[in-house]
Image (spheres, grey):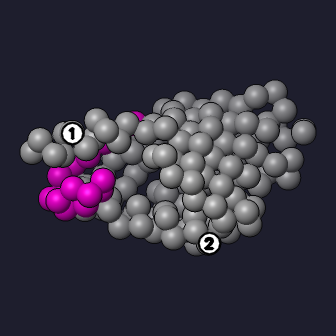
């Protein structure tokens, strides 16, 4: 694989999908049979991924994802990003939608196809810590 700009592709995905609050932008970035594994859940297929994003966005008002660090392997087939998600609670993790400011850290590992399309994403996020903060309020 000669793709040397995989980090740029992932950053564009964060900005154009998550920060723009636009699940439809997913079409420009991922393969039809895209797979994401997040929070112990597997979401398979582009349409299901877009629905999952829309549902997540509905639970966090003013969502913003700030990338702390990203890097890729030599051939660009893998990208890893550390990030911080901020916004206001509108029912994330089944909590009361109290509009409280929230922040959650996470790490994402991406598989990138040679043509730059995203194949798969594995996400680990600090949801338990966020849930405890919100539930203790």
The structure residue drawn at horizontal position 66% and vertical position 65%, both measured from the top left corner, is 45
Residue 23 located left or right of residue 1? left
The structure residue drawn at horizontal position 53% and vertical position 42%, both measured from the top left corner, is 123
Does residue 19 belong to the magenta stretch? no
The structure residue drawn at horizontal position 41% and vertical position 61%, both measured from the top left corner, is 56
Residue 95, position as x, y percentages in the image: 21, 56
Residue 34 located left or right of residue 22? right
Residue 23 located left or right of residue 103? right
Span shown in magenta: 91-105
Give neighbour class at mark 1: few <14, some 14-19, many 20+ (Cα, 10 Å): few
State whether residue 85 is above or below residue 60.
above
Indicate the quadrant containing the C terminus: top left, top right, bottom left or bottom right. top left
Answer with the quarter of the image where residue 50 lies. Answer: bottom right
Q: Secondary structure at mark 1?
A: helix
Residue 132 is marked as: 1
Indicate the quadrant containing the N terminus: top left, top right, bottom left or bottom right. top right
Give neighbour class at mark 2: few <14, some 14-19, many 20+ (Cα, 10 Å): some
State whether residue 70 is above or below residue 49.
above
Residue 47 is marked as: 2
Q: Secondary structure at mark 2?
A: helix
Does residue 96 belong to the magenta stretch? yes
Residue 122, position as x, y percentages in the image: 59, 42
């Amino acid at each position: 694989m000669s793709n040397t700009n995989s980090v740029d592709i992932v950053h564009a995905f964060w900005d154009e999908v998550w920060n723009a609050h636009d699940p439809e932008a997913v079409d420009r970035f991922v393969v039809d049979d895209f797979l994401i594994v997040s929070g112990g859940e597997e979401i398979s297929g582009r349409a299901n991924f877009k629905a999952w994003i829309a549902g997540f966005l509905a639970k966090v008002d003013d969502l913003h994802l700030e990338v702390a660090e990203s890097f890729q392997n030599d051939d660009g087939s893998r990208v890893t990003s550390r990030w911080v998600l901020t916004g206001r609670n509108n029912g994330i993790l089944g909590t009361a939608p109290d509009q409280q400011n929230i922040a959650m850290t996470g790490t994402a590992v991406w598989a990138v196809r040679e043509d730059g399309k995203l194949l798969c994403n594995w996400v680990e996020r600090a949801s338990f810590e966020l849930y405890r903060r919100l539930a203790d309020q």
